[in-house]
Image: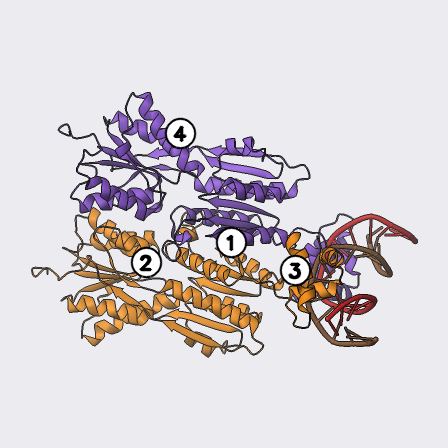
Chain colours: A orange, B purple, C brown, D red
Amino acid sequence: MRSEDIARLAGVSRSTVSRVINNYSNVPEETRIKVLKVIEQYQYEPNSFARALAGKKTDTIGLFAISMNEKENTTRIYQNNYFAPFVDAVVDTSNERGCYVLIHTVYSPDDFLKVKQAFLQKRIDGGIIVGTQKDIDIVREMVGLEYPLVLIDYDITEIMSEHLDRNHLAIVNSKDYEGATEAMEYLISLGHTDIGIICGQMNTYSGRERYTAYEDTLKRHNLTVNERFVLKGDFLKDTAYQEVKQLLSSGGTLPTAIFSANDDMAISAMEALSEFGLTVPDDISIAGFDDIQMASRIQPKLTSVRLPIYEMSKAAVEKVIELCDSQQPTFSTISFPARLMIRDSCQQPKPNHV
Amino acid sequence: MRSEDIARLAGVSRSTVSRVINNYSNVPEETRIKVLKVIEQYQYEPNSFARALAGKKTDTIGLFAISMNEKENTTRIYQNNYFAPFVDAVVDTSNERGCYVLIHTVYSPDDFLKVKQAFLQKRIDGGIIVGTQKDIDIVREMVGLEYPLVLIDYDITEIMSEHLDRNHLAIVNSKDYEGATEAMEYLISLGHTDIGIICGQMNTYSGRERYTAYEDTLKRHNLTVNERFVLKGDFLKDTAYQEVKQLLSSGGTLPTAIFSANDDMAISAMEALSEFGLTVPDDISIAGFDDIQMASRIQPKLTSVRLPIYEMSKAAVEKVIELCDSQQPTFSTISFPARLMIRDSCQQPKPNHV
DNA sequence: CTGAAAGCGCTTACAG
DNA sequence: CTGAAAGCGCTTACAG
């Protein structure tokens, strides 16, 4: 069934069929109805490729999840508790808006070729990139392609200093610095002075922001950053687990509280602590970040900073669509608030603690 | 940059460019290299739509996740612990095979239109359908479209009796019956005789299989099915939670063990029990199904039946691709083994139990 | 081995 | 208001 068939059946030309499909105003109601009826009857759907070729949009956006250091076959990206909700929300919102979404995972720089291809082959109108380790080279290249693009969680300063703030770009961030600060202030308000951190990946915006908030808050309260308590975690469960184990078995003093740059790592830390015979929050308080589903379901319930993932994803989708539609696109930036969800994993430090 | 440009630059015709792109054998090495070099140099990518229009495949498969009864805005599908791994694995495998994947969620019958459209508009070469509540009408319609289609978790008997076993269809299942039987046998071997079940959705294949295994195993051991212990759960956390609460507060006898048709519901049940002052496994044993990530991370670690999701997804992708490629497609069926992961949530019933 | 040409199924100026 | 025609960027018989 092609538009030509519909045309014949309805007794009009392909042009007219096309006009009704594309909602042109200059077709009389009578004709429109006649054509629509035939279309309905035969369940006709215009070939999307032909439409796109002839200049229409593809009505599909790309969602690219970058996770270069998750090891193959161990941690897959959608089981990563950070990505799943984004995928969820982006697909949802796009579908609501009548857009299809093409989804692609990037585990290696090679995979990035496929992302570029998706644009070059005109498979998508625009794209959303989410994930850790988006180094500037890749972003520069993507931005250089001049297709509508939304970056989730990216350092605006970097964009600005590289003059990448083009008019087909938008950045969607969360206020990680503020959120992390809130968590730190909370820990300090409980009376903690020896506070450790499990860092995220420092080559991500959020990784850096969460760490900087940690450092700044300590300094503001005239507390020192104990290098021994600054653990590398890379946002990865395993890394965090190892690092905590190591700290525990080091024999030195321990922090009375730990702020973890994400929940996955916080939970790993709890496991490590528990295996070491330490209880949360009795012995050590732990606060996480992301407020993943599991956070409120483990024992003790994890105090964590919640990000409005759904709203962020929605904004991202709306932004790409907007960028695709507008003749006069603009560069824009939007940042969503984060908020501390206080639960059971933190309490005052034991008075007898060294 | 179009093939014509490449042709000019390489001093050949578009036909030749197309031949090297499509790996025709009858182009001399010299010419091939010459063309390839130009393509490389300009990072040319053939317009996917033009290719598709001219008869090539689209190299994209659709992944449709059906979840008609998750309520809007409460449980989103990718946070549903059953779907996330599928999405993960399907995207992974497809990408490896050089395929893009178009993903779409179906929350309502209306959404199904979009799935049909994806086929009708020729956006995809084939599709995979995963999810609960795939009723036969919809399947019949999809199969009727005559596009390569793979159904994950679908009752083969139903397909056969409806004569839907067409040659562009494949079914990928897991041995839920065997897995559930294993769990039940295990519970019985521990000494349980009063075993309850939290059912999944009975209009899904896996929901029925898991229940039937429960019933059959009890009968085989001459144990009776106590209707009071058969709880409706619909695979949903909330429903399960409510039902368990209700059973607990009913005042009647309680089962000594509960088999839950999925882990989400098992965990909800554990929450309900804990709020009621009951401990797992001391007071009541619980076994789940799916072995989601969280199963091994909660306290106590949940005994659960593991499904080889990754392998199933991979098989599904390979099957669609195979169906798309072959001129002589066949109807096929494949079923993967499930296996009980014994952890800490089950033990022998207390001797003093009524 | 290779080019000219038709065709894939649309959309959209253009002309009337 | 509407049709004929050109064009989107490919692929593939066809002919040589």
The residue carrying mark 4 is B178
Q: Residue at x 38, y 63 (%)?
A: A309
| Residue kind at label 4, given as amino acid type | Glu
Judging by the rendered image, the residue that carries numbered circle 2 is: A233
Work out whether residue A174 can be spotted.
yes
Residue at the image position 72 percent from the left and 57 percent from the top = A6
Discs 1 and 2 lie in a common subunit: no
| Residue under the image location 41 percent in, 34 percent down | B208
Q: Mark 1 falls on what kind of element?
A: helix
Crowding near the residue tagged with mark 1, few <14, some 14–19, many ≥20 C-alpha atoms within 10 Å = few
Mark nearer the viewer, 4 or 2: 4
- The residue tagged 3 is A36
CA–CA distance between discs 4 and 2?
A: 40 Å
Above/below status of A275 relative to B340: below
**Badges 1 and 4, same chain:** yes
Q: Secondary structure at mark 2?
A: loop
Q: Tag 3, which secondary structure? A: helix
Image coordinates of residue B168 in percent, x first then y, are 62, 39
> Are the residues flagged by discs 1 and 2 in contact, CB closer than 8 Å?
no
